[in-house]
Amino acid sequence: MVPFLRQRSPKKLIQNKMFMQGFDKKGRPIGVVLGARHFQNKGGLDEFKRFVVYILDKLCSRTPPGEEKFVVIGDLKGWGYANTDLRAYLGALSILQVN
């Protein structure tokens, strides 16, 4: 197992930057991301990757059998330059591409 996947990411969870919000009409789980609550210097890239894997695992575990999709809503209200973290975004995209 990759070292950064061994533990959960409590610091990112405390920030409440993402939460589950029920299911859509087809039964797919819905996740809501609050972009204004992400700050680059809190925890580093490895912790952010652990957070992404944890959230994806939560979404996948709530996905009904036979369904391969989930819904993520990005709320960018209040998001600005202070919340921009290109390294974290590229890290999250690499996780999505590889897996």
Image (cartoon, rainbow, N blue to C red):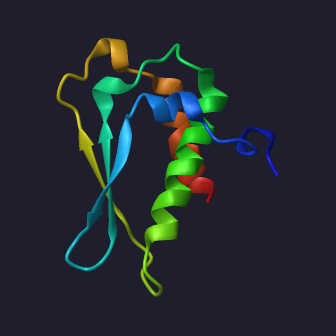
Q: Nearer the viewer, residue 37 or 94?
A: 37
Residue 51: where, in percent of width, then height? Answer: 55, 40
Above or below, comparing residue 29 to residue 17 in the picture: below
Q: Position of residue 25 (x, y in %)?
A: 19, 77
Left or right relative to 77: residue 4: right
Question: Which residue is painted at 34% across and 12% down in the image?
Answer: 82
For the C terminus, give its image quadrant: bottom right
Q: Is residue 72 above or below residue 60?
A: above
Q: Residue at x 60, y 38 (%)?
A: 49
Pinpoint residue 95: horizontal percent, then vertical percent: 59, 48
Residue furthest to the bottom in view is 66
Q: How many marks?
A: 0
Residue 74 picture quarter: top left
Left or right placement of residue 54 versus residue 22 in this view: right
Left or right, 62 with respect to 48, comes to: left
Residue occupying image coordinates x 62% and y 30% = 47
Direction from residue 5 to residue 35 in the image, left or right: left
- Identified at 37% across, 34% down, the residue is 17
Residue 22: % across, % down: 28, 63
Q: Is residue 60 above or below residue 49?
A: below
Quadrant in the rendering for residue 10: top right
